[in-house]
Image (cartoon, rainbow, N blue to C red):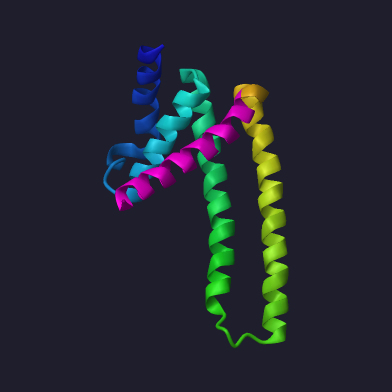
Amino acid sequence: MMYRTFKILLLVLPLLFGLTAFSQPGEKLEALRAAFITKKLELTVSEAEKFWPVYNEYSDKLKAIKRNLRQNYKKHSDAITDAEAEELFKLDLQSKQAETDLHKQYSEKIRSIIGVRKTIRLRLAEEEFKKQMIENIRDKGD
């Protein structure tokens, strides 16, 4: 079991991150997340080869939606007009809807690759990874 997971990681990580996987902190975090999720889901080599491009595409699109909303919030100061506030309010709702639509679309794609059980386990693995990263940050702060 351990050998199979290691073999998958050796195959998947270079595909995901090229030769510079550990050169940037963000890339290192992504590599850790990929290794964690691959292990938790017990992805086969075949599943991993199909799963990661779709998952990464989903993640990139989700980040773009969130980044756009965050940038729009940053543009406005405390002296925001009612019209600007209304526009930002609508953008916030549109962004949440776009996130929901994206989640639905990619959940179906991911489900077709790894099945419904692993898709459910994916959501749990994502949350577990976030909790571990937060705990690591807290531990370093103590």
Question: Which residue occupies 46% across, 19% down?
Answer: 45
Residue 8 image offset from top left, x and y in percent: 40, 21
Residue 62 image offset from top left, x and y in percent: 58, 51
Question: Which residue occupies 73% across, 69% down?
Answer: 90
Q: Which residues are magenta?
A: 118-142
The quarter of the image holding the N terminus is top left
Magenta span includes 134? yes
State whether residue 107 is above or below residue 46: below
Magenta span includes 119? yes
Residue 39 image offset from top left, x and y in percent: 45, 24
Closer to us: 141 or 116: 141
Residue 43 image offset from top left, x and y in percent: 50, 21
The rendered magenta stretch, by its main secondary structure, is classed as helix
State whether residue 8 is above or below residue 53: above
Direction front: furthest residue: 142
Question: Which residue occupies 40% across, 31% down?
Answer: 35
